[in-house]
């Protein structure tokens, strides 16, 4: 795929003009960079490999852990663009934070689920009663454990819930400090290959697997930022397409970034349930997030019902569909 630059973006004039993007290039202020969240192993680390790193506006990487820290950075106007699970925007809605969800990401969901130790005697979800289970608070793993327990006749109060950061959860699982780990992707493969783990229950039927691209209403109100966001969406889309066509290079780069052997990344790629894609705003993604919000409310984790529809903004959807 050719590099997307200012000229190629502007060639989509009819699409961009509909969203009010074209004037943004003239109004862009080079002293105000687009601040993009970056975390080890995320797509930001592959933009250069994909030929997408040279943006026609300043880029500032915000290197913080995910989850609540990303949400705080967005709501405090310290961040303009982030990749996140379906959960943080639900809390943002309650807090009346000016978030805007402008696209979704769909990818592999095969290895997402609950991992337990081999020969642990835990053979079904109902066996988790009273067991120590780790997940990352306010992320997709939090929702997944809630929904899995709920659909198998249990509640979070029926287990020993131990919320931990992802890396700490892996360490606790390795050292036998927890009985089950809610995880996904390369972490689940690593737990199975190197930590004596086995997938107890996959996320299929319990979780959409969607991630969301988020910005703020404040950023969208600035023509220059809005134009840069549209351009960066196309760059991220192109980078995921590059990964689909260059798995060996992606796996090698991932090994360098995380220390996890490239063979495991190639295993993840070969066994993926579907290609990774950045998608325009679609009703199915909104409905999936609404299900998450409803489960959080019914489980008592939020005190009010949340309608997620106002969080979504379709102004870039034609651009992504092209």
Image: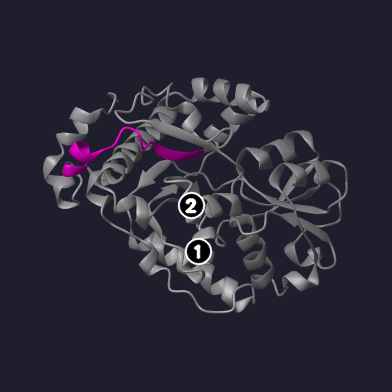
Q: What element carries label 2?
A: helix
Occupied quadrant, residue 186:
top right
Residue pictured at 67% horizontal, 40% vertical: 187
Range shown magenta: 23-37
Is residue 115 placed above or below 41 in the rendered structure?
Answer: below
- State left or right for residue 200 relative to residue 71: right
Q: Which of 112 and 307 is in front in this view?
A: 307
Q: Is residue 36 magenta?
A: yes
Q: Position of residue 56 (x, y in %)?
A: 29, 28
Q: Nearer the viewer, residue 136 or 321?
A: 136
Is residue 121 placed above or below 299 in the rendered structure?
Answer: above
Q: Position of residue 210 (x, y in %)?
A: 48, 53
N-terminal of the pair, mark 2 or mark 1, is 2
Q: Nearer the viewer, residue 62 or 48?
A: 62
The answer, for residue 151, to whether it is visible in the render is: yes
Q: How many labels does the image show?
A: 2
Q: Is residue 121 magenta?
A: no
Residue pictured at 65% horizontal, 65% vertical: 148
Is residue 239 placed above or below 285 in the rendered structure?
Answer: above
Q: What element carries label 1?
A: helix
Identify the image quadrant of the C terminus: top left
**Mark 1 sits on what residue?**
92
The answer, for residue 67, to whether it is visible in the render is: no
Q: Position of residue 197 (x, y in %)?
A: 77, 43
- Contact (CB < 8 A) between labels 2 and 1? yes
**Mark 2 sits on what residue?**
74
Q: How far apart are marks 2 and 1 (CA)?
A: 10 Å
Residue pictured at 38% horizontal, 44% vertical: 278
Residue pictured at 55% horizontal, 54% vertical: 72
């Amino acid at each position: 795929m050719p590099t997307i630059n200012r000229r190629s973006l502007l060639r989509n004039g009819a699409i961009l003009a509909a969203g009010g993007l074209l004037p943004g290039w003239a109004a862009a202020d080079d002293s105000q960079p687009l601040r993009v969240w970056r975390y080890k192993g995320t797509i930001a680390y592959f933009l250069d490999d994909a030929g997408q790193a040279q943006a026609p506006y300043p880029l500032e990487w915000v290197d913080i852990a995910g989850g609540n820290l990303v949400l705080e950075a967005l709501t405090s106007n310290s961040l303009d663009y982030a990749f996140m699970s379906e959960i943080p925007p639900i809390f943002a809605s309650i807090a009346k934070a000016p978030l805007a969800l402008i696209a979704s990401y769909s990818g592999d969901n095969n290895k997402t689920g609950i991992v337990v130790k081999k020969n642990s005697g835990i053979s079904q979800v109902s066996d988790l009663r009273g067991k120590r289970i780790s997940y990352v608070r306010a992320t997709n793993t939090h929702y997944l454990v809630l929904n899995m327990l709920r659909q198998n006749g249990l509640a979070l109060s029926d287990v020993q819930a131990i919320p931990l950061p992802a890396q700490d959860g892996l360490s606790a699982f390795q050292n036998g400090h927890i009985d089950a780990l809610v995880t996904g992707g390369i972490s689940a493969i690593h737990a199975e290959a190197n930590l004596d783990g086995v997938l107890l229950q996959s996320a299929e039927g319990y979780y959409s697997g969607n991630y969301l691209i988020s910005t703020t209403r404040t950023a969208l109100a600035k023509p220059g930022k809005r134009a840069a966001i549209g351009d960066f969406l196309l760059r991220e889309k192109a980078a995921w397409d590059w990964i689909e066509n260059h798995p060996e290079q992606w796996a090698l780069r991932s090994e360098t970034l995380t220390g996890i052997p490239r063979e495991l990344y190639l295993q993840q790629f070969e066994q993926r349930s579907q290609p990774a894609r950045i998608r325009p705003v679609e009703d199915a993604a909104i409905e999936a997030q609404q299900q998450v919000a409803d489960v959080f409310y019914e489980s008592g984790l939020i005190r009010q019902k949340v309608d997620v529809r106002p969080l979504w903004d379709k102004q870039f959807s034609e651009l992504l569909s092209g």
